[in-house]
């Protein structure tokens, strides 16, 4: 069985939700505390030198990291969670998937642990990253359909990112006030019964 190394509520939820949609069973291994020195960190670092979650160990022992790569792996098995090849929506899907992990996700890398990167001015780095992230989300909101999902009527893996990231900084209240489409889409995903168990286990609903 696939092992998902993660922390409840963290990026591993994105993988858990995608695996659940694809009907692929997995074992969740709680790595809470891995971001501080200790046995959890030592273990995770052996599997993924970046020491990040999600980290997946496949049935044959292959290590899989990077949420976008995991999304692509899921689409190999369940192509229905992305728009059809050849459609303009598919290009939009591909663009937003990579755009998110290339631009938004790194703001967490730097803002969550600012003292690692700028020990002399961690607060300034943190604040600047958070402001930059907000500007990214404002742009993203304008790219979304919200009818009712990100790319239209079909539920795709982009929607999975939205329901999870809406719970992270700058958090629900900010999203409600500034990004109506992200908010509406995330609310809609929360209604999907097949995801309730994972959403609840990760305190998203
Ligand atoms: N590019 C990775 C980013 C994963 C990531 O940054 N995960 C965070 C938790 S949500 C993490 O493990 N942070 C710990 C660290 O960066 O040291 C992905 O898309 O999966």
Image: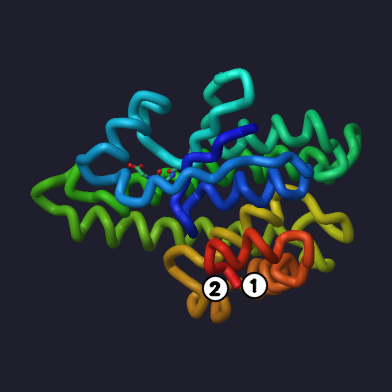
Instruction: Left or right? Give the position of 26 relative to 56.
Output: right
Residue 91, percent from left and from top = 78, 38
194 versus 58 height, above or below:
below
Q: Earlier in the sequence, mark 1 or mark 2?
A: 2
Residue 186, percent from left and from top = 67, 67
In the picture, the quarter occupied by the N terminus is top right
Instruction: Left or right? Give the position of 165 relative to 181.
Output: left
Q: Residue at x 27, y 57 (%)?
A: 126
Element at label 1: helix
Q: Is mark 1 within 8 Å of ligand 1?
A: no
Q: Residue at x 35, y 24 (%)?
A: 46
125 versus 83 height, above or below:
below
Residue 198, percent from left and from top = 63, 59
Q: Residue at x 54, y 28 (%)?
A: 57
> Crowding at label 1, few (<14), some or many (≥20) Cα neighbours within 10 Å?
many
Q: How many marks?
A: 2
Residue 104, percent from left and from top = 49, 49
In the picture, the quarter occupied by the C terminus is bottom right
- Whether tag 1 and tag 2 are in contact, CB under 8 A, the answer is yes
Q: CA distance from mark 1 to mark 2?
A: 6 Å
Q: Residue at x 49, y 59 (%)?
A: 9
Element at label 2: helix
User: Which residue, given by chain and number where applicable, does mark 1 sit on?
Assistant: 183
> Crowding at label 2, few (<14), some or many (≥20) Cα neighbours within 10 Å?
many
User: Which residue, given by chain and number where applicable, does mark 2 sit on?
Assistant: 175
Instruction: Left or right? Give the position of 3 relative to 43.
Output: right
Q: Quadrant of residue 69?
A: top right
Mark carried by residue 90: none
């Amino acid at each position: 069985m696939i092992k998902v190394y993660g922390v409840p509520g963290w990026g591993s939820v994105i993988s858990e939700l995608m695996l659940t949609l694809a009907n692929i069973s997995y074992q969740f291994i709680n790595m809470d505390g891995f971001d501080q020195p200790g046995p959890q960190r030592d273990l995770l670092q052996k599997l993924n030198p970046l020491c990040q979650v999600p980290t997946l160990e496949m049935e044959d022992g292959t290590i899989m990291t990077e949420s976008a790569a995991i999304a692509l792996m899921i689409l190999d098995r369940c192509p229905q969670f992305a728009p059809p090849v050849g459609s303009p929506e598919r290009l939009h899907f591909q663009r937003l998937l990579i755009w998110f992990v290339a631009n938004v996700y790194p703001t967490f890398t730097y803002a969550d642990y600012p003292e690692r990167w700028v020990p002399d001015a961690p607060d300034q780095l943190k604040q600047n990253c958070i402001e930059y992230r907000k500007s990214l989300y404002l742009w993203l909101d304008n790219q979304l359909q919200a009818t009712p999902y990100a790319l239209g009527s079909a539920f795709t893996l982009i929607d999975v990112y939205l329901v999870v990231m809406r719970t992270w900084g700058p958090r629900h209240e900010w999203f409600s006030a500034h990004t109506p489409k992200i908010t509406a889409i995330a609310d809609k995903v929360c209604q999907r019964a097949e995801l309730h168990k994972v959403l609840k286990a990760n305190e998203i609903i």
